[in-house]
Image (cartoon, rainbow, N blue to C red):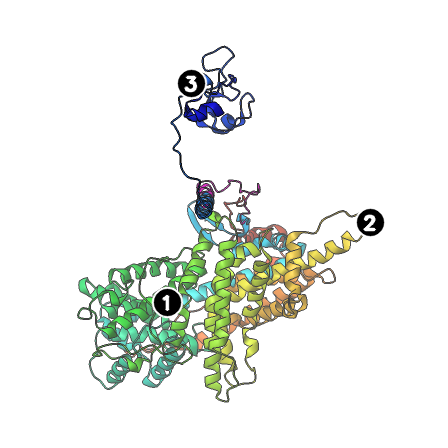
Amino acid sequence: MAENTANGTPLGQHRVVKRPRPVKSCLECRRRKLKCDRVMPCTQCQKSQRSCRYVADGEAGSVSDASDADIPDRTPKRHCAPPNHDDGNLLNAHTQASSALLEDYGARIERLERALLEKNSPFTERSGGCRPQRPVASALTMRGLTVKGGSRTRFFGPSSVRVLVNLFDEAKEFMFSGGDSSDILHSFLLVHKIHKAVQEDHRKATSPIEVFVNPMTPIQKRMADVLPSKAACDYMVRFYMEESETLYRVLHIPSFMSQYTQYWEGNQQPDYFLPQLLSILCIGYQFLRAGKGHLHNDREGIHMPTACALVRAWLDSLRGKQLVEFSSLQTEVLAVMAQRTLNTQNHEAWQHLGLLVRMAMTMGLHRDPSEFSHKILIPFWGEQRRKLWTTILELDIHMSMQCNLPSCIREGDFTCQPPRNLNDDELYPNMIELPPSKPIEVETDSRVQVFAAMTLITRLKAVDLVNRIDTLQDYQQILDIGNELEQALGDIHYVLPQRHMDNVTEARRQWMTRVILDMNCRRPLLALYRPFALSSADAPQQIMTGYLKSCMILLSYLEDVDSSTPDYPHIRHMHHLIFRRDIFHASFGVCYYMKRIQSSAVSARESESPQSNSKPDPVEAACTAASRSSMLLSLPRLRTSVEKVIDSMINRISEIRTDLKDLVSLTIVFYTYQGETHEPKKEVQQALQRIVDAGLQLIQSSQENIASTTTVAPPTGQTQMIDFQTDPTLMTDTESYMLAADMQNSLWGDFGIWDVEFWNPFMTNQTPIS
């Protein structure tokens, strides 16, 4: 070789003889240049599901393609000077950069592949070889469907009492068996008859007076005839402005009050004024009638069913361009809010709210006014549109959670921004531009709505998650939304700190504002946590503790109010009026934790015995850990809180009326899980007897009041009496019925009706979510 080099023969032309090497890899691995493990079939072919084939000895191609016969002559190398040290550093740097870039590309491709696999197949195993943890909750405790007559159905969601009762097997068995006692069966029958009488009473109480809804006279004349005195109207309008026109902004207060003053001075007002005024009076009267009972006929009040019927008749008479007037939309919103005070079925309000949302969208309220020219939409009306659209969103979220049904509006369906934190007297029709928004710490007419609007998107996400809970892949989304809502709850105490105030009225107003804002975020938080905290065996501890904490905070709102103040009866009335359903739901949740904590204590004692090898139940352990996280969540305090709720509901049975079945269910559930030292049958019997006594007193007082109370005088000057007379034989035949020879058969026949109507809906979904 040295000689050839010396003679000038290029090294590239010198042939190096190599021996032939047989091919060991399969044909597919050779073609794809993959590493082959040389088994039959090889691993690479198994992964790609290809046919694996090897070349037999003696066949063409059995010799390596890199043998001497196939190697072409190499191109002569170019003689270059040896590189210096700097060039070597540059080459190494370039090589390192290329290697880092390739590693980055590889990592990005790996993440992309993982994301695509998770999206296409929710059950694909992750890189750790473990199946992803999906939220699992029992369908029996999440939804239900009542079927009557084969085709009449109604859906119930996870916050319905009918579904919550399914969490308590012993209590359900007690209801169905009647406690195996004739005394308890007797109490059930009496409560059942009281409930029927109350329902009939409520139906008649919510019926409008025929003489006013008669279409023979002009609608404006009929609406003017049902108005109470100016002094009564002043009182109810003031209550509406203070209590309702905070979170639910509908009106420009100075403009409406100007029309209101001119109306009583005898000046003609637009056609929409009286329908708006009647709706406002209905909403204000519900805050005013503390201690007067449900729909009590007050000469200084207003007959709400008649007023609502007249407003609805006026709205139904609108045609053409009148339907897209901003004042018409305002009246529709006020009418929905007023009707909610009469109708206990939230499903009807939810259905009508869907039409209201679409009406607002046809008017373009879902788009922010800044998207349009000021020549088309002046700043004043733009701000009024923002307030009204935010109110519609608040109503949509609230009714969706009450009905356990999807909201009409989703994130991304609108671009309208929240209103500014301004007083109404700073806004006027001819203004050129809006003043800058004030800080949220500054109290204004719109402050409550502006603060609530900050969490609108988060609450919409929470409602959406609850209604598509079957599609969730893990708990992360629930925890993220829950953290945002809990952060918002913490911000409330920063914006509205608790301070001692000498002015009782101002202190009550501050308390009510703080409670409304707190409940505005706590409702979706409870709805988000409830399905998993009450039925999932693998829910994170944050959900278990957060749900119990929120339930107890909801039940303890009134503890911040001094019961000796003159305003306490009114505060207690408003608290019960606004949060009655939420109180029932929270009480059932607390009872579930009580049941689990007691079971955990029993299991702990049994596990101490040498013969026991049982493992602790994860749900019981989580509930116990949640209770021990704070003294405010201890078992004695849980019992005391629910017992106070039951006592309060029994004492205010005249206001819960049609919620009587929920009260009976809660009473049985609570006294069934009082621990081993208590006697559930005896305590349930005593509690049911208290409900019976309060119900009989309610029916008797209602008949006496109705017999001595007249309604608003009709236009003819005659006095109109509303016939609320209940069945005079309601309770007179009870004893003979109980003493009949076939008492047991009769009891079970009647009690069967009670079961079907109260607690035994036909559940169609019995399989758990997987």
Q: Position of residue 323 (x, y in %)?
A: 22, 64
Decide: few, some or many residues near mark 1? Use Cα within 10 Å; few <14, some 14-19, many ≥20. Answer: many
Which mark, residue 610?
A: 2
Q: Residue at x 55, y 66 (%)?
A: 550
Q: In the depicted view, which residue is nearer to us: 92 or 723?
A: 92
**Magenta span contains residue 415:** no
Disc assigned to residue 70: 3
- Of the residues shown, which amino acid type is indicated by label 3? Asp
Residue 642 located left or right of residue 17: right
Q: Return the x and y of residue 565 as percentages of the image width and height.
A: 53, 85
Q: Amino acid at mark 2?
A: Pro
Q: Is residue 217 above or below residue 674?
A: below
* Marks 1 and 2, how far apart at CA: 63 Å
Q: In the rendered structure, which disc, 1 or 3, sits on the residue that comes first in sequence?
A: 3
Question: Which region of the structure is painted magenta?
Answer: 108-135
Name which of mark 2 and mark 3 comes first in the sequence. 3
Q: Is residue 750 above or below residue 725?
A: above
Disc assigned to residue 339: 1
**Three-letter code, disc 1:** Gln
- Asked whether the residues under the numbered discs 1 and 2 touch, taking CB atoms below 8 Å apart as contact, a structural biologist would say no
Q: What element does badge 3 sit on?
A: helix
Residue at the extreme bottom of the image, as rendered: 502
